[in-house]
Amino acid sequence: MNISLFIPCFVDQVFPQVGISMVRVLERLGHQVDYPEDFTCCGQPAFNTGYWDEARAVAEPVLRMYRDAEVVVGVSGSCGAMMTSFYRELFQGTPQEAEAKAHAGKCWEFTDFLVTKLGVTDVGARFPAKVTFHDGCHGLRELGLKKQPRALLAKVRDLELVEMAEAENCCGFGGTFSVKFPMISTAMGEVKCASALETKAGYIVSCDASCLMHIQGLADRQKLPIKTLHIAEVLAKT
């Protein structure tokens, strides 16, 4: 399959290893990947803040960029939800409405693409560690990501998954939420970190690097003995 990559701006700028890991897994499975280098942002920050005209100005080039793509695969639950769910709302009643719906229909989050679209759970990964999993809000509630990442982690050799009590609760990042309400955001993140520590896991794994950025920042500032990894990084390890 010819796969067009959707690499969110913060992954491109801050966590390039996540995108690289996704490419390694997809190529290991025999697929051809393509990355449109002109891509910048899906428009989610403006959309979430209520600036829909500005969000459309950012999103319209995205629709054109992926117009001829066979399938679009990304490594972010939140940005994936923007393209699969919120583009339909953003472009409703506009000349781009039909194209937005068509675009949404061929967009997939990475783990959902592997498990649901390709029917693959074993990608040949090995990672000897104890991990716990954080369910990002958009991935869980908008995309239905729950069983898919766990099915993949279950086939990673020498990996032990220990569920934390607060797995489905928000980490407190929420994009602009953490900027508008930093004290609440920090308190929510501290609850998440404490729950992860209770599992005695060495790593917090998630489908969303933005959540992990927030969690790792709190862990580093408090010198907590836990690290974060995107699930694509885990699946790329052999």
Image: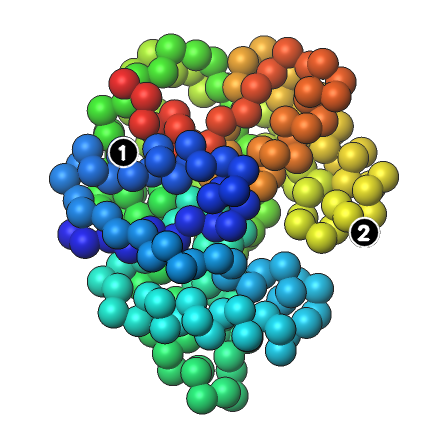
Query: Residue 15 in the image: x percent, y percent?
Result: 50, 36
Query: Residue 95 in the image: x percent, y percent?
Result: 45, 88
Judge the density around disc 2: few (<14), some (14-19), many (≥20) Cα neighbours within 10 Å. few
- Residue drawn at the location 49% of the way across and 27% of the way down: 229
On screen, 21 above or below 90?
above
CA distance for labels 1 and 2: 37 Å
Residue 71 falls left or right of residue 202: left
Q: Nearer the viewer, residue 62 or 125?
A: 62
Judge the density around disc 1: few (<14), some (14-19), many (≥20) Cα neighbours within 10 Å. some
- Residue drawn at the location 33% of the way across and 28% of the way down: 235
Circle 2 sits on which residue?
A: 180
SS category of the residue bearing label 1 = helix
**Amino acid at dot 1:** Arg
Residue 200 falls left or right of residue 60: right
On screen, 52 above or below 96?
above
- Residue drawn at the location 77% of the way across and 40% of the way down: 185
SS category of the residue bearing label 2 = helix
Residue 117 falls left or right of residue 149: left
**Amino acid at dot 2:** Lys
On screen, 219 above or below 207?
above
**Can residue 150 be seen at all in this image of the molecule?**
no
Query: Residue 42 in the image: x percent, y percent?
Result: 50, 61
Q: Counting residues from the N terminus, which is met first, the one under dot 1 or under dot 2?
A: 1
On screen, 48 above or below 124?
below
Query: Residue 79 in the image: x percent, y percent?
Result: 51, 54
| Quadrant position of the C terminus in the picture | top left
Q: Nearer the viewer, residue 213 or 174?
A: 213
Circle 1 sits on which residue?
A: 24
- Residue drawn at the location 37% of the way across and 54% of the way down: 37
In this view, the residue farthest toward the right is 183
**Can residue 226 be seen at all in this image of the molecule?**
yes
